[in-house]
Amino acid sequence: MENKLNTKIVRIEKNNNAQEIISEAAKIINDGGLVVFPTETVYGIGADALNDDAVDKIFKAKGRPQDNPLIVHISSMDELNNLVSEIPEKAKKLSEAFWPGPLTLILKKSKIMSDKITAGLDTVAVRYPSNEIALQLIKISGKPIAAPSANTSGKPSPTEASHVIEDLMGKVDMIIDGGSTYIGLESTVIDMTSDIPMILRPGGITKEDVESILGECEYDPAIIKSNEKIIPKSPGQKYRHYSPKAEVILYKGSIENIAEKINQDYEEALHQGKHPGIMSTNQTEKYYNSKTTLCMGDRTKLLTISSNLFSCLRKFDEMGVDVIFAEAVEEQGLGKAIMNRVGKAASKTITV
Ligand code: TXA
Ligand code: MG
């Protein structure tokens, strides 16, 4: 049996004792412990990236497969030089444009990055987040911080401290509650080791954003088509991820067609004795009178949907819903990342 840790939960609000809390958290990092902290994307479970024993604890706490490498978080450009062996011109340009922010760059690793972090790859994933609590924690600890999303492996990433508490209570030393995260989906991961940068995971920095700086950029074929024969370059993308307990069915097509088909399937599910739920949008709520729905947000403001998505999936679990009917959104800009995550949670897609 694992020893249960006495997890300390602390809330940071504007103007309260942030400095004191972050100093305590930094001490835990320096002592080889685990601290969960907010970022602008999702909550991360952090450890000193230069301490293999501490990094090992992350894998245990999450139940994460050892072959899935971690992202190392920094709080200034200077810190990057120690972690990587070279910084290509294109990576420099992207970092200048989008760091600090929801962007992770895959670069050739330096000797100080252990195989534990990189899962034996010769590259390392680095991110410079913009969340003030995350930045202060990295600065004050004086260490690069390895941090995957702070969920149990396979569950949706946490966007609120309550999600972290549900998954990791007793498995980490401290949870810093900084409120709801802003974007709600994990960072964009881009491989900068090939000539044309390749998006391995879509996120808050979109393909269009990258093209505006570099001119060209491609998606890893594995994220466009789910085809078991294509092996994703990002090990994390091969796992069925982001899944609530309920079955998720994704509906693509015009709004009216989607709503009509979901209404039919909802009635059918009730008939079979199931507890269905509909993940709707502001524009479609009106079609689902008196049915069980959670509204993700506004189709014309995709940030409202991205920030709510994982929270909706978890809420349906709490409500005892066993089949979720999810509406597709347009796969443009942030919509690409939203559809990537819903697609991974879904067991089937119906096009109407
Ligand atoms: O927004 C985020 O990125 C959050 C916050 C906490 O920063 N972190 C996060 O970490 O989502 P994680 O571990 O849940 O996802 C990291 C992804 C995984 O899919 C992993 O396979 C991929 O990045 N990755 C890490 N190192 C890699 C490498 N060297 N080459 C390719 N993919 C890599
Ligand atoms: Mg994750």
Image: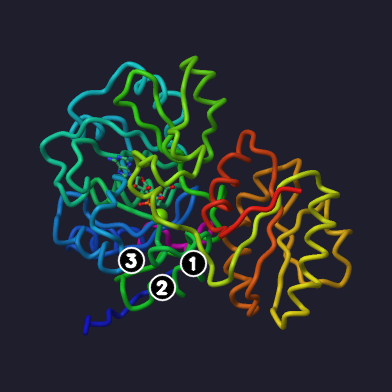
Q: Amino acid at mark 2?
A: Ile
Name the one closer to the observer, 52 or 271.
271
The stretch in magenta equals 11-20
Q: Earlier in the sequence, mark 1 or mark 3?
A: 3
What residue is shown with label 2?
9
Q: Residue at x 45, y 51 (%)?
A: 39
Q: Which residue is mark 1?
A: 161
Q: Amino acid at mark 3?
A: Lys
* Quadrant of the image containing the N terminus: bottom left
Tell me which amino acid carries mark 1.
Ala
Residue 215: percent from the left, percent from the top?
49, 14
Dot placed on the residue nearer the N-terminal end, 1 or 2: 2
CB within 8 Å, label 1 to label 2:
yes
Tell whether 1 sits left or right of 322: left
Name the image colouring. rainbow
The image shows residue 28 at horizontal and vertical percentages of 24, 64
Q: Which mark is first along the chain, 2 or 3?
A: 2
